[in-house]
Structures are given as structure tokens and as C-alpha cells.
Image (cartoon, rainbow, N blue to C red):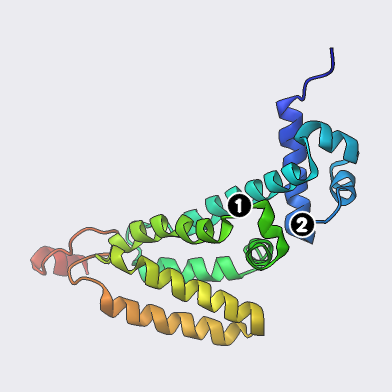
Amino acid sequence: MGRRPEPHIKDRLLDACADHALAHGLPDRLEPLATATGTSARMLIYHFGTRDALLRAVLERARQRQLDAFGDLLRVRPGEPYPATLDRAWSAITGPGGQPYLRMFGRLRESAEQRLWPDFRRTATTDWLGPLEEGLRSIGRPDLATLVLAVIRGLIMDLDATGDTDRADRAFRHFLAALEHLSVPGEQGDGRPARPAGPDTAAEA
């Protein structure tokens, strides 16, 4: 009877492969991943079945990390206006911590690697609509999620093409200033109706 793959070993190998791919890009061959995990290409095939199955698993693991990290950045924070949340999220997404994900999945949209994840372009769009709708609901405008996502993705493409961080940052902050004017009056950053002015609220100001 042959050995059966051990899930905890497979999971550890997958994490190490994802670390390597985020740092250096998704390789064409298994050898770089074998070196990064301290094992052999044969053992990787033993655990994952085929080269393409491993590469797809690496992409999915990296994508889940991105969803967790970026999703948390887009979450509503009590007492913080949502445009301010988006401003902070933009800085993190386009900063050093977010760049590996943008590089990996930007290439996936444009390259032959799409065969590993044929519906990725659609998924890469719809994944973010839910978190943005939830966040924008706090200012009464969940209907603007598609617009906000289009602006973010467009500026990320601009930044990737030009490297002009200052211009992209300015453009995004101009957009956020316009977004504040599109919010529904009476909504606070945490989604609660604004309290009418009165002696108590004046004293708190």
C-alpha cells in the first residue's frame, strides 16, 4: 500500500510555494518551488498531482490571502468616515505590502497563465463588490460600489504603467473628495444616522 498525502504537509508546502510566488512571481517550472520548500519536484507532484494543479493551488492560496488582507482594509470602522477608510486602504493596497498581490494578479489577467484560472477576470471584479457595497452603505451609497471599484482598478493600471505614484495618489484623493459630496446627508462614517444638533451634541463637540 502506497503512502497517502498528509494534509498538514501539503498545507505547509502550499504556504511556502505561495510565499515564493508572491516574492518572485509564478514560475514556469517546479524546480524553484521545490527549492523554496526544501523538497523535490517529485514530492510536489506527489502531494498536488500535476504541475498545473499545484500552480492553480498556489494562485488560490495567494488570492485568499489578498482577499483577507484587502477585505479587512475595506471594512467599516466605527467613527471613521468611509472615504477616510478608502484613503487608508488605497495607501496600503498600492504600498509595499500590497504590491506582490498586484503584480501576481495583474499578470494573471493579461498572460497565458489565465488557462490556470479561466474565469479569473470576472472573479477578480466581483470579489470586491460585496466589501465595497457594505462599506459604502455606511454613507448611504452602496450603489456606488461599481464606480469606486472602477476608479481603484483604473488607477492601479495607471500606476503599473507609469509608476507615477504622486499623480495616482492625487487623483484618488480628488475622487474621494467628490465621493464625500455624493454621500446621503445624515449618514455618519459608521452608518448610523447623524444626531440632530442640540444642547447635548453641542456640549460633546
Do residues under tags 1 and 2 come within 8 Å of each other at their CB atoms?
A: no
115 and 25: which is toward the camera: 115
- Taking the image as shown, residue 171 lies to the left or right of residue 188, namely right
Disc on res. 75:
none
For the C terminus, the quadrant is: bottom left
Asked whether residue 163 appears in the rendered view, the answer is: no
> x, y (%) of residue 13?
77, 38
Residue holding disc 1: 63
> Percent from the top left, x then y, of residue 137?
29, 60
Q: Nearer the viewer, residue 196 or 157?
A: 157
Q: Say which of 193 and 94 sits in front.
A: 94
Q: Residues within 10 Å of mark 1 (few under 14, many from 20)?
A: some
| x, y percent for residue 86 | 43, 68
Query: Most extreme residue toward the left, as rendered?
Result: 198
Q: Which mark is residue 26?
A: 2
* Mark 2 nearby-residue class (10 Å; few <14, some 14–19, many ≥20): many
Q: Residue furthest top?
A: 1
As helix, strand or loop, the secondary structure at mark 1 comes to helix
User: Going 68% across and 52% down the picture, which residue do you hit?
Assistant: 116
Is disc 2 placed on a helix, strand or loop? Answer: loop
Work out whether 185 lies above or below 36.
below
Report the amino acid beneath label 2: Leu
Amino acid type of the residue tagged 1 in the rendering: Arg
When asked about the image quadrant of residue 34, the answer is top right
